[in-house]
Amino acid sequence: MTENNIDGITGFFDIDPRLVELAESAQEELTESFKRIDRIAEYNTFKVLKAFTKNKVGENALHGTTGYGYNDLGRELLDRVYADSLGAKDALVRHSFVNGTHALSTALFGVLRPGDRLVMCTGSPYDTLEGVIGLRKQGGIRSGSLIDFGVEYGCVGLKSDGMPDHERIFESVKGAKVAYIQRSRGYSTRPSYTIDDIKRLVSVIREANPSAVIMVDNCYGEFVDRLEPCDVGADLEIGSLIKNPGGGIASTGGYIAGREELVSLCADRLTCVGMGKEVGASLNQNREMFLGFFIAPQTVASALKTSELACMMLNKLGFRSLPMAGLPRADIISSIEFGSVGPLTSFIRGVQKGAPIDSYVTPEAWDMPGYESKVIMAAGAFTSGASIEFSADAPIREPYAAWLQGGITYPSGKAGVLIAIQNMLDEGTLTL
Ligand SMILES: *Cc1c(COP(=O)(O)O)cnc(C)c1O
């Protein structure tokens, strides 16, 4: 055996040896960052294992139910395991949430009533929530949005540095029923917020309005840090199972975790008032949801390292990334600015080439519903659309940035990053 793999791996995918050297030195420089990521993954793995053992998850919990889904032990224990791991009192983890937006929508409709006020504390929400809230013009008068149901809406813009505006939030949340925080930045260029940022926000909101329901969109944030939003005082936290907490294993689903009476309102909204959490067949999903959640801390660590490596290599090649490599992260997302359409497209196509599924497909930019400009996407995933798997997408507009995320194992993520950058060389949009 040779001491390093360099000669070997250049051969599998025809990778320029200089790129492999660059990857090796980038990885070397990331030693401290990787250690920090590993320590967090270790902590969170212990935490999740504790939740499994404390709740006595047995082999029988891995089997599902059919029909009404009464007495579904697996479903009930999965809720307990999520709650205990995510710093919450209760949780609603269901494969029947069709995506993260559905879970967020269920929580908003579950808690808000006509005449109540919803305040976004972290600027405009993620694009798909515009429909839920009623910010988009839609056909017909009765859109069924929150605003259509008589919910009042307010949004506090961010400060010029992209951070929450505490003073204005303090004034705006007075009298609000729900104060909403979005942890990850979506397609905006603000920073994603750390658990400390969320903790500060929670204390500002609490001081202004002790009874506000503080709801956090936790998408892409789970297990990136030791604590979760509910650990630092949020009332509800919500996310998608084809992102971090599904561990790359769950086929679909979402979760809502938080205070018991609020989770119960959400469950009544998801199923029927009076039935709440007591129904809903888990079919054959329990095993993969348990397994996915069990490995999720490690999957998140792999995704974080993949992101770090991509940023470090591309930073060294002269491209700016948000965040820059080596800094502590609040989520698994990186955006990398390519400055023009050529290198951006080559990179995205290279990400597709480096994916295990559909590697032979060439992504094209298309008019995605709900987006202003064309979008190009690379997604060669075992689970359709799963962004915990190595994937990238980019709106074709200034500053020609690719949003990169995922990597369910670090070595496969590393290979993917190398193949993506090699594709820039091959297409002549990058020279070394
Ligand atoms: C992914 C995401 C969502 C939910 O998106 P879905 O595609 O519906 O799962 C919501 N908020 C943020 C910040 C996200 O990143």
Image (cartoon, rainbow, N blue to C red):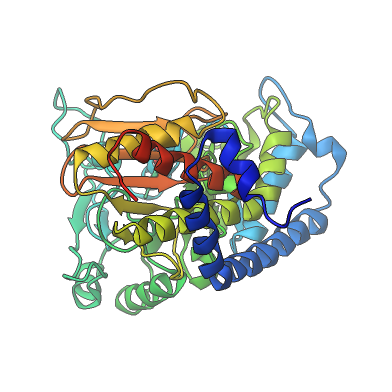
The front one of 95 and 367 is 367
Q: Position of residue 113 (x, y in %)?
A: 32, 47
Residue 288, given in percent of the width and then of the height, sits at 69, 35
Where is residue 280? Give x, y as percent: 62, 29
Q: Is residue 311 above or below residue 369?
A: below
- Whether residue 18 sits left or right of residue 344 in the image: it is right
Measured along the vertical axis of the image, is residue 123 above or below residue 374? below
Q: Does residue 375 appear in this view?
A: yes
Who's the residue at 43% across and 61% down the image? Answer: 312
**Left or right: where 299 falls relative to 370:** right
Expressed as whole percent of the image width and height from the top left, the position of residue 158 reads: 20, 66
Q: Quadrant of ligand 1?
A: top left
Closer to the camera in the image, 389 or 317: 317
Residue depicted at x 66% and y 39%: 289
Residue 204 placement: quadrant? bottom left
Q: Quadrant of residue 173?
A: bottom left
Compare residues 251 and 323 and report the one nearer the observer: 323
Q: Image height check: is 334 above or below 142?
A: below
- Which residue is located at x 19 percent, y 43 percent? 340
Residue 132 appears in the picture as rendered: no
